[in-house]
């Protein structure tokens, strides 16, 4: 038993070490550790924030902090630098007056566009070192990683209340009758009462 646990532990340690090795390799390969990402004045986090603002409407600082797992205080300082450089504007939200919506200014978009192209060109240059089949293999591997880790981090589907549809109330009566008979021993007379109440609800529903 001790030997088996040792092998399992060693295997897990090897897996962890392999993932960390890949992280070190890839962050270096894409220039994530550079002071200025892709030889720009912006760091990797700043580039990501600019990307989100360029591709999503109606974002708030809270949205960015949550979606990118950023410290709110750090993000606040980053956004203030962007505002000082006139890259980002802030306006009152139409859905909630207490919220402030962020958006790239015209200067922000003209600043981001060449940076975005430079990022795409850098990836293209890296892929050009591979033959087409190798490129597809890399993409497949990346999709597997994204699917396996992303599925566990996905946000739950929001619950949406909707009006009743044809057949819904009949199903409610059926389940109500079955469950109350099972749990409390109520007979069909109670189910008939429920059906009467449900019928009145349908007839007078506004």
Image: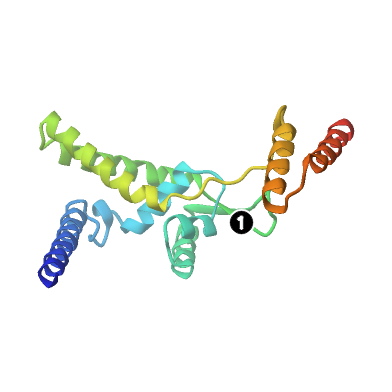
Can the viewer see residue 164 in this picture? no
**What is the secondary structure assignment of the residue under circle 1?**
strand
User: What residue is pinned by disc 1?
Assistant: 100
Q: Is residue 114 above or below residue 64?
A: above
**In the image, 168: left or right of 107?**
right
State the residue in front, 153 or 196. 196
**In the image, 206: left or right of 118?**
right
State the residue in front, 155 or 88. 155
Q: Is residue 35 above or below residue 141?
A: below
Q: Is residue 117 above or below residue 156?
A: above
Residue at horizontal 64 percent and vertical 42 percent from the top = 160
For mark 1, does the 10 Å Cα neighbourhood hold few (<14), some (14 to 19), or many (20 or more) residues?
some
Provide residue 117's location: percent of width, then percent of height: 30, 39
Can the viewer see residue 86 in this picture? yes
Count of numbered circles in the view: 1
State the residue in front, 166 or 196. 196
Provide residue 124's location: percent of width, then percent of height: 21, 37
Q: Quadrant of the N terminus?
A: bottom left
**In the image, 182: left or right of 152?**
right
């Amino acid at each position: 038993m001790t030997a088996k646990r040792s092998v399992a532990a060693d295997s897990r340690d090897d897996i962890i070490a392999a993932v960390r090795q890949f992280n070190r390799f890839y962050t270096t390969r894409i220039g994530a550790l550079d002071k200025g990402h892709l030889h720009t004045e912006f760091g990797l986090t700043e580039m990501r924030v600019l990307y989100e603002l360029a591709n999503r409407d109606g974002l708030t600082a809270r949205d960015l902090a949550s979606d990118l797992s950023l410290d709110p205080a750090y993000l606040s300082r980053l956004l203030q630098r962007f505002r000082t450089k006139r890259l980002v504007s802030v306006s009152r939200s139409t859905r909630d007056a207490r919220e402030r919506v962020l958006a790239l200014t015209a200067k922000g978009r003209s600043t981001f566009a060449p940076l975005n192209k430079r990022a795409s060109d850098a990836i293209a240059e890296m892929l050009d070192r591979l033959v087409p089949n190798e490129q597809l293999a890399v993409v497949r591997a990346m999709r597997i990683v994204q699917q396996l880790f992303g599925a566990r981090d996905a946000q739950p589907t929001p619950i949406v209340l909707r009006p009743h549809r044809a057949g819904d109330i009949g199903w409610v009566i059926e389940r109500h009758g079955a469950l109350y008979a099972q749990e409390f021993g109520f007979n069909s007379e109670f189910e008939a009462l429920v059906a009467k109440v449900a019928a009145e609800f349908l007839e007078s529903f506004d």
